[in-house]
Amino acid sequence: MVALTLSRKLAILADAAKYDASCASSGTEKRNSAKTGGIGSTEGSGICHSYAPDGRCISLLKLLLTNFCVYDCAYCINRSSSNVARARFSVDEVVRLTLDFYKRNYIEGLFLSSGIIRSPDYTMEEMVRVARTLREVHLFAGYIHLKVIPNAAPELLAEAGRWADRLSTNIELPTDSALEHFAPEKRPSEIRTAMARLRGKLDEATPDKKPSKAKPEKFAPAGQSTQMIVGADKADDSAILTRAAGLYSGYRLKRVYYSAFSPIPDASSRLPLAPPPLMREHRLYQADWLIRFYGFNVPEIVAGGEGGHLDLNIDPKLAWALKTRQSFPVDVNRADREMLLRVPGLGVRAVDRVITSRRHHRLTLADVSRLTASIDKVRPFISAADWTPGGLTDDIKLKQKLTPQPKQLELF
């Protein structure tokens, strides 16, 4: 077998890692090598690979340790039966690449996943060695995100959280039955057990409100996340969002990432021939935002669409508002924060500005327009000191007016 050069390995294993969406670096603690004498920082920005929720561009070296894998998951391009080019990094090679890329200001950190080789414990131990070497030997203070191997030993998961900023354990598919069908070698219970163990360690690392001399040991300060593949099975948006809501409440997740299924070469006949619309992935992210920050529950969100699916033409908050017109208009001078958050076009910051401003005087429509960039969407759903929507209540015409043009994406 011909030995691969480092650049060839990088080409293969960086490309193989592109299917994992859960690589945002938001939420970690701030570290700066200027204070420690080491290398790297979680602060600042570089080449844009993804965005944090605050809008900051972040750049990560995103790799698989190897795309060899003993599992044969039908939906995975790196499954054991797949006819793809294979490569494997050594621990030292990943460390060297990370440091070289960082010194050139190409990246701010490392996202490392892997196919399963030899055993889950062996694979997890290799990834932990990468993180430990970066931190202890090279004093690397940049961001590190490690993918968790579900049935690896608890002590390996504990050590991973000691060195990494974020850990993620992918649940892969929205339902247990789908995972058992497409990936029979994986056990949903093992995935949940790993997530529960991480949740327990995160709870232990949370500072107690009571004064104490002993500070808890740090563990994955940016928390844990997971990813679901959308469109590989027949799960509707209601099932996907219900699973996501349960994961947020049960395992203290920072994020659930949604990845639209992408057809792969030599795919199983059990898989769909075409990918789902990318807009479906976008609407799921919007719905996820409503669950986490706007006080919506899953039945409310999916009620705005049809047959358990979100409306692909308009965002889920607007879809809900059009289905519940009896809740509007909302008086911006009197409504509570919970109801203001349900107004299409009003985001969290805009609502906070409205509440602050109305303490000083009654708000007019012009006042509201200065507090939000989406006044055209807001206007039909509010009343103000000098404004009521009046005849702007024809739902069909209103939906047509507020439906964005094709390829135009918006948050709310």
Image: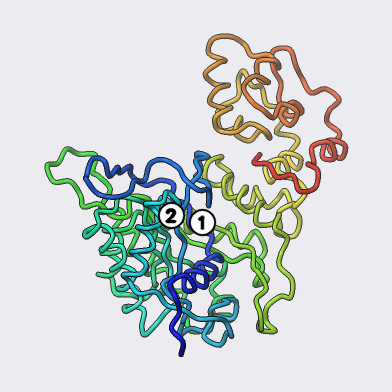
Q: Quadrant of residue 19?
A: bottom right
Q: Amino acid at mark 1?
A: Val
Report crowding for label 2: few under 14, some 14 to 19, many 20 or more residues within 10 A (C-alpha).
many
User: What residue is shown at x 69% (from left), y 13% (from top)?
Assistant: 385
The disc at residue 253 is 2
Q: Above or below — where is 249 with respect to 397?
A: below
Is the Cβ of the residue at disc 2 closer than 8 Å to that at disc 1? yes
Alpha carbon separation for disc pair 2 and 1:
7 Å
Q: Is residue 68 left or right of residue 409?
A: left
- Image location of residue 54, percent across then percent down: 50, 39
> In the rendered picture of this protein, how many numbered marks are placed on residues?
2
The disc at residue 376 is none
> Which structural element holds mark 2?
strand
Q: Quadrant of residue 403?
A: top right
Q: Above or below — where is 69 with respect to 316?
A: below
Q: 286 or 383: which is nearer to us?
A: 286
Q: Is residue 190 left or right of residue 356?
A: left
- Image location of residue 244, percent across then percent down: 53, 58
Q: Above or below — where is 186 with respect to 36?
A: below
**The C terminus, quarter of image:** top right
Q: Is residue 204 left or right of residue 304?
A: left
User: What residue is shown at x 74% (from left), y 75% (from top)?
Assistant: 273
Q: Is residue 357 left or right of residue 37?
A: right
Report crowding for label 1: few under 14, some 14 to 19, many 20 or more residues within 10 A (C-alpha).
many
Q: 239 or 154: which is nearer to us?
A: 154
Task: From the image, tell me which residue sits under label 1.
Answer: 256
Q: Quadrant of residue 114?
A: bottom left
- Image location of residue 175, percent across then percent down: 56, 70
User: What residue is shown at x 75% (from left), y 43% (from top)?
Assistant: 323
Q: Amino acid at mark 2?
A: Leu
Name, please, the residue furthest toward the bottom: 1
User: What residue is shown at x 53% (from left), y 78% (from top)?
Assistant: 78
